[in-house]
Amino acid sequence: MRGSSRVYGDRGGGGGGGGETAAFLAAALCGLLLLTGAADAQSIQRPTAYKTLKGETPLVIAKGGFSGVFPGSSEAAYSFASIASAPDTSWWCDVQLTKDGVGICLGDMDLKNSTIIATVYPARKRTYVVDGASKPGWFSVDFNMSELENVTLTQAIWSRTDKFDYYGYPILSVTDLPVVVKGLPATVTHPSMWLNVQHDIFYRQHGLNMRSYILSTLKSVSVNYISSPELGFLQSISRRVSSKTKLVYRFPDKITSDPSTNKTYSLMLSNLTLIKETAAGIMVPKSYIWPVTGDNYLLPPKSIVQDAHKAGLEIYASDFANDRIIPYNYSYDPLQEYLSFVSNGDFSVDGVLTEFPITASEAIGCFTTLNASKVDHGKPLIISHNGASGDYPDCTDLAYQNAIKDGADMIDCTLQVTSDGVLICMSSINLLDTTNVQTTSFSSLATVIPDIPGVTGVFTFNLTWNNISDGALRPKISSPSSEYYLVRNPKYANQGKFVKFSDFLEYGNDKDLSGIMVIIEHAAFMAESLGFDIIESVTTALSDAGYSNGTAKEVMIQSKDSALLVKFKQQNTKYKLVYTLPQGIGDASSSSLADVKEFAHAVVIDKSSVFKQSLHFIINQTNLVQDLQTAGLAVYAQVFRNEFVSQPWDFFSDATVEINSYVQTVKVDGLITDFPKTVRRYKRNSCTGLGNDAPAYMQTVNVGDLANLIKAQGVPDAQPPAVAPMPVLNESSVDQPAFPPVTPKNAPPGSKPSDAYAVGASACSLLVLACAALLI
Ligand SMILES: *[C@@H]1O[C@H](CO)[C@@H](O)[C@H](O)[C@H]1NC(C)=O
Ligand SMILES: *[C@@H]1O[C@H](CO)[C@@H](O)[C@H](O)[C@H]1NC(C)=O
Ligand SMILES: *[C@@H]1O[C@H](CO)[C@@H](O)[C@H](O)[C@H]1NC(C)=O
Ligand SMILES: *[C@@H]1O[C@H](CO)[C@@H](O)[C@H](O)[C@H]1NC(C)=O
Ligand SMILES: *[C@@H]1O[C@H](CO)[C@@H](O)[C@H](O)[C@H]1NC(C)=O
Ligand SMILES: *[C@@H]1O[C@H](CO)[C@@H](O)[C@H](O)[C@H]1NC(C)=O
Ligand SMILES: *[C@@H]1O[C@H](CO)[C@@H](O)[C@H](O)[C@H]1NC(C)=O
Ligand SMILES: *[C@@H]1O[C@H](CO)[C@@H](O)[C@H](O)[C@H]1NC(C)=O
Ligand SMILES: *[C@@H]1O[C@H](CO)[C@@H](O)[C@H](O)[C@H]1NC(C)=O
Ligand SMILES: *[C@@H]1O[C@H](CO)[C@@H](O)[C@H](O)[C@H]1NC(C)=O
Ligand SMILES: *[C@@H]1O[C@H](CO)[C@@H](O)[C@H](O)[C@H]1NC(C)=O
Ligand SMILES: *[C@@H]1O[C@H](CO)[C@@H](O)[C@H](O)[C@H]1NC(C)=O
């Protein structure tokens, strides 16, 4: 449909039309829209008074609409912002002027990043001086409105999906916005309008008059807010706007002085009384409020919010987006960031400018009054993944202590054994994965062990507990998204102490937890090659720690080794047995379910087994969870992470949207997470239990809606490719040969030749060590 854009409103064309996309979006994304009308303010608990200027609920301002998903300032982006966010969400339009004086909504005066202009008019690139700097590009001042007729909108941020660029969304003029509003579904509240005039002087230099454009537009469009970083512009219109239009002075983060006054912004900030003469509020980049250090940690907040309020000014914070790097203090959780601006106990900003308005809406609507009742251990269970490994190195004392503090219901320990037979918690048998071992003298112990798939390792079973714990070896924080250069909490990257299984059992015993999850891998290898009887050792350790007498916490034993679980079962273990299913399966045959049921109470599945995806779009939901639950198995899904690259597009780079789907739609019995804090906060949100009365932004996303929208565009190139059917779990993958007997410890290694792999190992290990060193 590219190139067949419709002509809007008073642009000389037929008008109308704006409704089509909105209605379509609403129908396609009806999961979010379901009974939006029912979600009124009464059912949502909000603080009696926010610490905003007048105690009102902070405003969500959608920058170019929901531009985190759809091309910014497109009809789809605006409509979806209203459909998926708080009812009073404001539509933000960055006004640019065309050569013939029409105001259009576009994020930048250079059209290149957000439209296809460079391909339509390849020869019309120009260079202008903007804010004192030379800037090449395709500027709105060089094109008249009819020339822009076929110039359609595209996603400006390269890391977001470009699949909605193919629809051919036309550039909207300011006067088109009311037409788009008319097209919104009847249940959706009409948005307020926010016009931002970033450059008045530039347009004046090009013979265009922003002031008269805005003033004439006010006659036909009801505008609630007008913002500008040029005080002179606001002054020029201040006497001509009615009292229902608020003027907001905007502080930018780059240019250093206001070109209309030639005063620096820091000077302007020191005289809020001067601003108050013209404006009702100010807008500042979020770092003006919560400053950030060079290494991306938060400093204590400045008093600017209180100062603005004292001066009688509203204050809005800008620059929010779910897929931006935020200070490490927020643990990659954008919702947490909003809460620090609207619900920190000391102050609240009057509004937030965001490209993902759904997350701001959730924060304000459902998370500012968290259920204060003490931790309950009801469904869904929050199971940590290597402790609070999103913030601290896997399986260290810090990771466990914080997992408990953050509200995990169960903490987990993946067992490894040392050369002197001590059981420890460590996420990998290979110390190269979890420690700085390559920088220590233990690096000479690097080998390849044929029974352990993978590469060269320095294995836990080649070091004594003393070697591991005496201080030379440091833990290393996990970084599952390092391919995207997203690292975790660098200040704590090597902090914390390694933990013995016996210490872990102590943590579990005297804390407010529902239980512990013990994960056993490589059990057969331990039995055959190390002569270590893990079943016996675990059973003894648990009863020594008091877990066996039925009064203590629940114990789950998890493994992907069915033979091991069968052996536990044969020994009449009291503990709950949990089977880890292979990754990527889409269903399970009924005979395999019956087999699993023989030895397991519950299963762990990978998140990827629940939703079928193509290019990170969800295209279908499998029946796996339902089938497992029908067979009487509890289902725990793993691994939930906050990093925005870990979720499919359908969850809008928002970990809470994802969790909400797995809880409400998929109905898993537990979530295994690197960030127990995020899941605990989800469980305490004040919109839980509202059912169909839950606000639109807490309704779950319909499976496949975004993919269906792309399909409806009818452009073959845009389709996420079909994917192969997911494999089905069958009996032959569940049934394994019986668990091997334990080889006595000092017996000869038998069939395991210990030198055969030595040559390969030395060549290979250098390479691996070199690579591993780079990652630290
Ligand atoms: C536009 O894209 C270029 C790279 O293609 C980037 O350097 C520039 O910062 C972008 N500008 C804006 C305003 O996003
Ligand atoms: C727009 O520009 C084109 C090309 O320069 C010109 O032919 C056309 O008349 C202009 N339209 C208006 C309304 O100014
Ligand atoms: C836009 O596309 C239509 C259909 O291809 C064409 O008739 C029209 O002339 C184009 N407009 C401009 C300004 O190129
Ligand atoms: C600000 O400085 C520029 C360049 O020196 C000058 O052209 C302009 O008139 C000044 N504006 C005001 C309001 O003083
Ligand atoms: C702030 O601005 C007002 C109004 O222009 C002026 O009267 C006052 O002296 C200024 N205060 C400071 C501290 O500069
Ligand atoms: C952010 O985290 C750092 C490191 O943990 C800490 O020192 C700092 O106090 C935190 N900032 C705030 C505002 O809590
Ligand atoms: C708060 O949580 C408790 C325990 O889960 C629950 O029983 C109660 O209904 C919740 N209260 C509200 C207002 O959600
Ligand atoms: C590590 O332990 C395994 C199993 O006990 C043994 O076969 C191997 O020789 C050891 N490697 C080193 C380097 O000590
Ligand atoms: C490892 O510990 C053992 C005893 O626990 C000790 O004999 C050995 O020297 C240590 N190895 C290193 C490299 O420190
Ligand atoms: C169970 O074990 C715990 C810890 O050892 C102990 O405190 C408790 O008294 C025991 N209870 C029974 C009934 O034996
Ligand atoms: C979606 O998955 C379900 C269950 O596996 C299946 O029955 C259905 O045919 C699938 N739908 C599509 C469109 O592939
Ligand atoms: C069972 O599943 C495995 C792995 O998906 C597959 O290789 C095998 O062919 C399947 N066997 C049967 C009998 O379907």
Image (tube, rainbow, N blue to C red):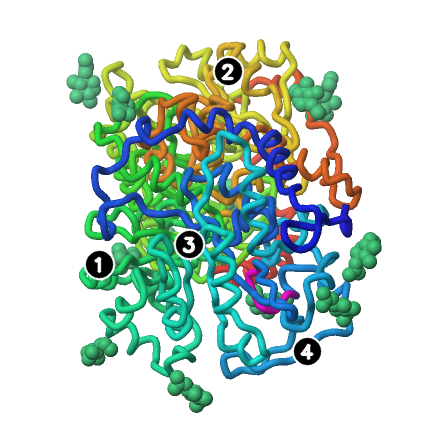
Quickly name the residue at label 3: 353
Q: Secondary structure at mark 4?
A: strand
Discs 2, 3 touching: Cβ within 8 Å: no
Looking at this view, is 525 or 603 the one in front? 603
Q: In percent of the image, x 64 and y 35: which residue is there?
A: 613
Q: Nearer the viewer, mark 1 or mark 3?
A: 1
Report whether the residue tagged 4 is closer than 8 Å to ligand 2.
no
Main SS of the magenta segment?
loop
Quickly name the residue at label 1: 309
Q: Quadrant of the N terminus?
A: top right
Residue type of the residue flagged with mark 3: Leu
Q: Which mark is residue 566?
A: 2
Q: In percent of the image, x 67 and y 33: which residue is there?
A: 708
Q: From mark 1 to mark 4, how far is it between C-alphas?
A: 43 Å
Q: Relative to residue 187, is residue 316 drawn left or right?
A: left
Q: From mark 2 to mark 3, how far is it between C-alphas?
A: 56 Å
Discs 4, 3 touching: Cβ within 8 Å: no
Report whether the residue tagged 2 is closer than 8 Å to ligand 12.
no
Mark 3 closeness class: few <14, some 14–19, many ≥20 residues within 10 Å: many
Residue type of the residue flagged with mark 4: Arg
Quickly name the residue at label 4: 126
Q: Nearer the viewer, mark 2 or mark 4?
A: 4
Looking at this view, is 288 or 776 the one in front? 288
Residue type of the residue flagged with mark 1: His
Mark 4 closeness class: few <14, some 14–19, many ≥20 residues within 10 Å: few
Residue type of the residue flagged with mark 2: Val
Query: x and y percent of residue 221 in the render?
Result: 50, 52
Magenta-drawn segment: 106-111
Counting labels gives 4
